[in-house]
Image (spheres, rainbow, N blue to C red):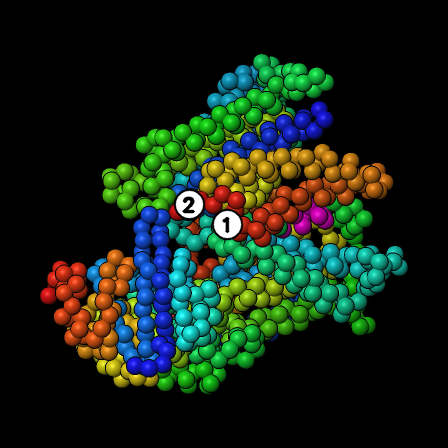
Amino acid sequence: MSDDAITRTHPAGPALGRMIALLALAVALIALPFVVQALGQPALVPLATRVLIYAIAAASLNLALGFGGMVSFGHAAFFGIGGYVVGILYRTYVDDALFLGFILGTDQLLITLPAAILVGGLAAYIIGALSLRTSGVQFIMITLAFAQMLFFLFVSLKAYGGDDGLTIRRRNALFELNTRDDTTFYFICLVIAALVFLVLWRIVGSRFGMVLAGIRQNERRMAAIGIAPYRYKLAAFVISGMGAGLAGALMANYLRFVSPDMLHWTKSGELMIMVILGGVGTLLGPLLGAAALVILETVLTGWTEHWQLVLGPVLLIVVLFTHGGLNGLISRLGPGRSAS
Amino acid sequence: MTLVFEQLLNGLQFGVMLFLLAAGLTLIFGIMGVINLAHGSLYMVGAYAAAFAAAQTGSFLLAVLAGLTAAALIGMAMELLVLRRLYARDHLDQVLATFALILIFNQSVTILFGRQPLFVSVPPALNGSVQLLPGLSYPVYRLAIIAVGLLVALGLYLLINRTRIGMLVRAGATHREMVRALGVDIRLLYTAVFGLGALLAGLAGLMAGPILAVQVGMGEQILIMTFVVVVIGGVGSIRGAFFGALIVGLVDTCLRAFMPGLLRHVMTGSEADALGAGIASMGIYLLMAIVLLVRPKGLFPAHV
Amino acid sequence: MTGQPLLSVRGLRKRFGGLIATDGVDLDVRTGEIHALIGPNGAGKTTLITQLFGELSHDEGAILLEGEEIGALPTPQRVARGLARTFQINQLLPDFTMLDNVALAVQAHQGHSFRFFAAARRDEALRGRARQHLATAGLSHRAEVRVADLSHGEQKQLEFAIALACEPRLLLLDEPMAGLGHAESEQMVAMLSALKGRVTMLLVEHDMDAVFALADRISVLVYGRVIATGTADEIRDNPEVRTAYLGEGDA
């Protein structure tokens, strides 16, 4: 693949243009709630929140998929598990009961988010440890199948709503903030998303990230310099699952609802679409991709309930005829950048 | 005892349906190296075309023809228009492009036939039951499915091991260049193989019509189970697909039939039912996990 | 010579179905020597290297590195014990620059890579060492070029630089001159002889001029068997070798 604007390969050169673009993005994201209020479109704030949450999930998936070359078709499982951690802890808290007989419930975001990250990571460890014994097409099928298994698990958990899902009456609390307020919740998600992207950026450029990118490019070469790929792939898969769990926990708070739908295999597909729309293996690509998909969905559902009939061909065209997704497209159109 | 026997037959019937899908999927993967998520869509196409033809004409024979033709034609069109461009691509592109096809197929069918499931009646000739054992009468239609499935398995075995086409197919999987050098049009071969896979998926779909609801999403539900079959059996192996399908069919059916009953010995009725259903629906995936631990390449890995 | 050899292979056998690729190979590589492995095409030279390196498992026999049996170890652990190889068909990281490729090998040699925070591309401990290895291989001027944009010859030299960065005790070289131009070949021969004595090498090579110029000892592999081992002169004069190999070759 080519060197993209915000790229996995590129060394030094702290390109000034890139710094300015990042700064502009940050300013735009911070100003967004105020601007849309002023424009009389307050409904856009929740929409933007959704984009941020999906961006976290897609960026996490991208660590495994884009940087590590592991085509996981089961990331909705970790996303859904994150959601259920919030839901079950909240239900346990409201019922004043103990989950599994020893876990106290809570409605504190500072506890539920780390818990979701932990449980998401644990699930990714178990599924990853098994799935990474294979590769290629089997890996895809197996991650999909394990996610489907967890989907059925939550469908059968009648105590937590089964098929119908679980309503969370109030969003988790964070300090004295009014998390119910859309703008406040947007900023919470923005800060978390910024942290996630920061962490991913550091990981991708670290020794670990270099090894991961090396494994994606040529496992045989990596073994020949003394690196056993399995542990590194598993670690990346676990980190990726943690991020998806975090996003799921935020989504459960955002919707104040969690259901097996969050683990449905089509959700895994959507996360992959976001990654490829934005540009596989680019840092900010998933944000672009999440925005593109959420906006496309919102606009199209305004016209027709059959919006997927548009999404299908769009996706097909992107896969068959573009390389590097939107991010690649932008960097190719951008000034002074050749598609090397 | 008769109950157990009946469930074994049900499992066998489900198993051969899975085999029809798994055979096509594994053949297409083994030969073209493509993972085709839209394989389940061909199953759905077969089911809908047959249901539609049956409703219009009342003839089961025409329904069968319609189901097979529609699935094979759409399958080959799919290969010509989309899949052919994906042979040289990585799995990610294949997954996403065929996922896009699923979206297109599902929405198109929803627009054409609506969201309500269609129900298809069992053809009169195959209606009724036969007495297999004292106290066990079993629907003729389900027996017919088993028979068709086993016949197809035998036919595939002969086709692949005994014919020139089969030889090309086997050689095409491992020595693409050599087959090409023999002057065989490999593109035509691929399209034909794809058509065959689509035909089998359509066959499974049209046979499923009278026993399951024909509805959007039916393809993906069975597709994921087919993946489990392929992983358990070994990717690329028809023999693996056959035994994997029977194992998965039997295990799934028996767990669903007996798990709640077994649990009722240790807990109350409704809890046992819920938990039993949960364990039953997860059963084949756990089986897959165990197979992966013991034999990461599946039970019958394709020999290179 | 006294003392035990660095690498000692005993009775190594490998079958592919009915074909015997390695047929009871015995081979000793002494510390410090360049030991060339020659033989006609299809003799099983690359297959042997691949088994020594653990990428292919053998059916029978023993592989000893300084007396320690390493035959059951996976490749990364053999690398940790001091083996490195170059590939006849380049195995490189195409999206990375030359420097990245070598720095990653330096990094792997320094221990585990579970370090998630510091920027690896600004780590002088890695980059500085990698630049030295590139300089040894005569590639400094191309350090920041992406592998995908390199010529075949440069990729070949990069293979060598990466293997050096593993700081091996025993270097397995699989046709390092194959596909190189005349000037590049001479450069490679010069590099190998500069390294002679510091790193022990098992050299598979078809270029006989290079082999006779470099090798302390030569083993001849025919149909998966070592039919002779000796100095260049001994091998030249060996009648069996002449009929089996040199006679049919370009002599």
Residue A148 makes an appearance in the image: no
Task: Farthest residue to the top: give it.
Answer: B125
Name the side, left or right, on which C100 lies relative to C157.
Answer: right
Chain at numbered mark 2: B
Where residue C69 appears, as percent x and y from the top left, is 44, 69
Q: Position of residue B157 (x, y in %)?
A: 43, 31
List x then y, in percent, for residue C121.
46, 79
Q: Nearer the viewer, residue A53 or C23?
A: C23
Q: Which image quarter holds the C terminus of chain C?
A: bottom left
Q: Which residue: 64% across, 47% down?
A: B286
Q: Residue at x 50, y 40 (%)?
A: B240
Q: On the rendered structure, is C140 left or right of B215?
A: left
Give residue C250's position: percent from left, percent from top.
12, 64
Query: In the structure shown, which secondary structural element does the residue marked by tag 2 occupy?
Result: loop
Question: With respect to residue A298, does B47 lie above or below?
Answer: above
* Furthest residue toward front: C2
- The verdict on residue A154 being magenta is yes
Which residues, given as a range, are shown in magenta? A147-155
Q: Amino acid at mark 2?
A: His
Residue C234 versus residue B283 in the image, above or below:
below
- Name the residue nearer the viewer: A130 or B40: A130
Q: Nearer the viewer, residue C137 or B131?
A: B131
Dot 1 amino acid type: Lys
Looking at the image, the residue that sits furthest to the left is C251
Q: Residues within 10 Å of mark 2 (few under 14, many from 20)?
A: few
Where disc 1 sits, the SS reads: loop
> Mark 1 — residue?
B297
Please check the rendered image and state whether residue A335 is part of the magenta-colored stretch, yes or no.
no
Alpha carbon of mark 1 to alpha carbon of mark 2: how far? 11 Å
Q: Which residue is mark 2?
A: B303
Vertical arrangement, residue C105 with respect to residue B138, above or below: below
User: Image quarter for residue C88?
Assistant: bottom left
